[in-house]
């Protein structure tokens, strides 16, 4: 399966995992495609735009927290840690951490190679004395990190409440994979969004300018571009819903009319009102977050939040395996 022409006129093979997830997701009921496939280059750029929107409180709130806790984090983690960021470096949050703790190296991990290389280049220019080692990979699985940092103590960095995009079971698996990747003695700095009123939550995922809608719809455009899709984009609309029972905001691509289309030469049909579930954003109370971390093999050692309790940042350390409380 070939992609459409890239920006430079070359052609390359589509990610087979993307193909498999899309086909399986369109065949299952209810339909669902994993949110990780939002992040091609265009999707990553749109998400960066989302973080600047007035409705999207998580980024500015987390940035404010990180801006004031740097000295405390540095004192708690000690000297010489290599920072391993699960996801390409944020232009705002990552520099705050790197400036505060003076790490021995920085390893951003991301599945979107183009965006990873671009963001790594920017950070390398900003921190010319820092060893920057971009690592293109799917961080949902345990990884063998570059040998250059094999002997360094490590600090995992997972900002942005991305952990909320996963079901609790998947989030637990990811935390365990992070622990396996980072190794003995590792620590983890992680952001988690708090439960709050739906009238605050839903607009953060359905902004007035329509940027989040474009981010969601870009998944269909990517399917058409990379998987020879014929999805009629105008037959879908972006929808954000608060699911109180599961404490999460859900994003859907909802059909506005009956539609038929092909993906990878396979026919599909969707009825008006049906949807493709594309993202979850789970919200956690303080106790819930600590339980989740412990279930994933991490012991919380510090917690910071904003004055309104909208968002929290946790520092945790890898806990030894145990068979009893």
Image: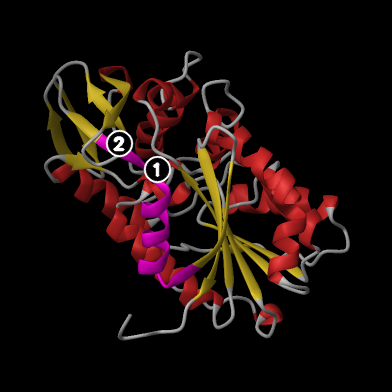
The magenta stretch is 277-299
Q: Quadrant of the C terminus?
A: bottom left
Q: Position of residue 43 (x, y in %)?
A: 50, 37
Q: Does the magenta-highlighted stretch encompass residue 77?
A: no
Q: Nearer the viewer, residue 100 or 312?
A: 312
Q: Quadrant of residue 197?
A: top left
| Residue at the disc numbered 2 | 229
- The residue sitting at 26% across, 37% down in the picture is 277
As rendered, which of 109 and 297 lies closer to the eye?
A: 297
Q: Residue shown at 70%/60% (left/top)? A: 73
Which of 214 and 206 lies nearest the eye of the viewer?
206
Estimate how packed mark 2 is, as few (under 14), some (14 to 19) or many (20 or more) residues with alpha carbons within 10 Å. some
Q: Are marks 2 and 1 in contact (CB under 8 Å)?
A: yes
Is residue 87 in sight in this rendering?
no
Q: Badge 1: few (under 14), some or many (20 or more) residues near its Cα, within 10 Å?
A: many
Report the residue marked by disc 1.
226
* Picture coordinates of residue 174, whole percent (x, y): 40, 64
């Amino acid at each position: 399966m070939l992609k459409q022409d890239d920006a430079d006129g070359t052609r390359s093979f589509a990610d087979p995992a993307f193909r498999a997830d899309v086909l399986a997701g369109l065949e299952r009921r209810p339909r669902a495609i994993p949110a990780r496939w939002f992040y091609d280059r265009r999707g990553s750029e749109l998400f960066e735009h989302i973080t600047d929107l007035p409705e999207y409180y998580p980024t500015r709130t987390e940035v404010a927290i990180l801006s004031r806790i740097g000295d405390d984090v540095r004192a708690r983690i000690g000297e010489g840690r290599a920072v391993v960021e699960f996801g390409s470096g944020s232009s705002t949050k990552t520099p705050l951490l790197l400036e505060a703790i003076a790490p021995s190296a920085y390893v951003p991990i991301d599945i979107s190679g183009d965006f990873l290389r671009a963001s790594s280049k920017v950070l390398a220019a900003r921190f010319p004395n820092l060893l920057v080692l971009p690592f293109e990979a799917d961080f949902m699985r345990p990884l063998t990190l570059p040998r250059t940092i094999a002997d360094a103590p490590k600090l995992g960095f997972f900002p942005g409440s991305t952990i909320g995009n996963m079901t609790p079971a998947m989030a637990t698996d990811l935390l365990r994979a992070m622990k396996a990747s980072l190794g003995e003695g590792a620590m983890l700095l992680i952001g988690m969004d708090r439960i709050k009123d739906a009238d605050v939550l839903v607009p953060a995922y359905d902004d007035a300018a329509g940027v989040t809608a474009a981010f969601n719809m870009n998944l269909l455009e990517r399917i058409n571009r990379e998987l020879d899709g014929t999805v009629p984009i105008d037959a879908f609309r972006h929808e954000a819903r608060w699911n109180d029972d599961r404490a999460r905001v859900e994003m859907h691509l909802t059909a506005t009319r009956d539609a038929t289309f092909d993906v990878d030469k396979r026919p599909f049909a969707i009825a008006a009102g049906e949807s493709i579930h594309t993202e979850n954003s789970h919200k956690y109370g303080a106790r819930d977050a600590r339980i989740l971390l412990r279930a994933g093999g991490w012991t919380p050692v510090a917690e910071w939040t904003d004055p309104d309790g909208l968002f929290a940042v946790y520092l945790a350390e890898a806990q030894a395996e145990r068979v009893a409380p």
